[in-house]
Every structure is written in structure tokens, then in C-alpha cells.
Image (cartoon, rainbow, N blue to C red):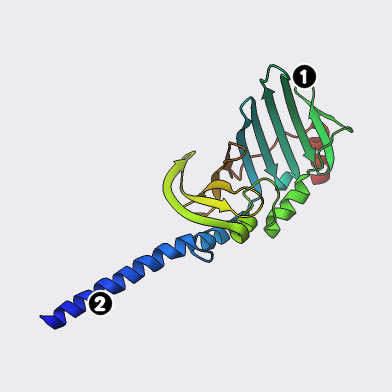
Amino acid sequence: MGDRYWVWLAARLLAGIALVAWAFSYLTPGGSGEKEFQKALDATKQVRTVRVAETADPSGTQHSDLSYELVCSQSAYHFTWHMVESDPERPAQLNRDELRVGVLPYRRASDGSWEKDTNLVSTANADTMCKLLARGENANLLPDFKTMIQRGIIQKGDKKTVNGVRCREWKVTLKGGVNLEHDTVCLGVDDHLPYEMTVDWTRSRSTYNYDSSFQLELPAAEVQQTNATSN
């Protein structure tokens, strides 16, 4: 009877140690959170087409809707931004609709077509973004997994569905600076790609789509140039 008691006690002790080790792996650097984010970083290196939809409410009176579209096979990048400031002392609206094909900038004309814009301030271009993604660097399109791995405390969350894709949510607390930043990233259960991200200090939510068949509408001049090159 005494031997059975000690065997039972040892088994309970081992089980408790295993449980603590399992929990510790989720809450400390080098645990499964960091391993999962490394898989996500490796997965994003293969991304060549992505569409991002983002909403943000950085203040009580400001709301923004943004979209980013990148197609590496076309060397094309499309960006739209609609911002409304409802503060009665400084009401404002801002709209941007920009396209870059290679390094050539375009803006949306009143008739809906694209026209060259030599005054375009944006320096973003598709070739640079595609190279950054392939190297696992931050292209300001997808979550910055490298920084999250280096500076974040990552905790495992629940599974959910985002735009028809099953993903698991991970909660990230970024260390450094005056305040802590709290983000959530939902990674695909099967492909480890990010499908949703929220950021507390900007009150923003971004969703991601990787439809490889998606193509951007290019200006007529670019289409003619592409056809001539192909011929």
C-alpha cells in the first residue's frame, strides 16, 4: 500500500512538472509562440500577392480606411486611403488612390483611369517590397514578425475563422519604449500566414488575402508596354 502511494505521488509530481513546463513554453522567450512566429516569418517569405484591408481609429474623432495591394509578378503596388477627421475645430477629409508600376507613379483621374503623377510623394514600390518580403524583412504590409520574435512576449490564444480561413490567435506584448504595445495576430492553422492583426494603440484591425490569381488593373500605357515586350 505504501509503495503504491509513493508511485501515485511520483506520477502526480511528474504530471505537475510537465504541466508547468508546457505553460512556461508559451509564456517565455523561445517557447512555442516564438517558434510559431518563426514559421510565420518563413511563410511570408513566399508571399508574392497580398491584399490588405485596414481600419483604424487612432483618436476619438479620426477614422481611416486603408487598402494595400501588391502583385510581384506585375511589379505593381496599389494604395488607397480615406480619412475623416470629425473634430468640429479641425474637420477634414483626405483621399488618396495611388499606383506604382515599377518606379512609375500614377494617380486616379476623375474619369477613373490612371494618369502619371510626377508629384507623388510616396516612395513605396513593388520591387522593393517584394525583395523585403523574400528576405523576411519588414515591408510595412505584413506583421513585423522579426521584431515580435526579438522583443515580444507571445501568448497562445483560441482558434477562430477570418474570411473563411481557420486561424489561431496569438497575443503579443511588445517590450521597449515608454509604453507597452499589445497586438493580436491570427495565424493560419495550415499555412502559418497571418490573416488578421489588431494593434491597441492605433485601434486598428487589418485582414490579409493571398489570392495568387489576383491581378491589378494597370494603366493602358503599361498594358501596351507589357504586350509589346511579350511579343
Judging depth in this view, the residue of 32 and 99 nearest the camera is 32
Q: Identify the image quadrant of residue 153.
A: bottom right
* CA distance for labels 2 and 1: 77 Å
At 77% across and 50% down in the image, what residue appears?
A: 128
Residue 45 in view in this figure: no
Quadrant, the C terminus: top right
Q: Which residue is mark 2?
A: 10
Q: Mark 2 or 1, which is nearer the eye?
A: 2
Judging depth in this view, the residue of 33 and 11 nearest the camera is 11
Q: Which residue is mark 1?
A: 111
Task: Provide residue 62's location: percent of width, then percent of height.
Answer: 65, 27
Task: Provide residue 83's location: percent of width, then percent of height.
Answer: 69, 26
Residue at the outermost bottom position = 3
Q: Is residue 132 left or right of residue 180?
A: right
Residue at the outermost top position = 88
The type of residue carrying mark 1 is Asp
At 54% across and 51% down in the image, what residue appears?
A: 172
Task: Provide residue 51's location: percent of width, then percent of height.
Answer: 63, 40
- Of the numbered discs 2 and 1, the one sitting upstream in the chain is 2
- Element at badge 2? helix
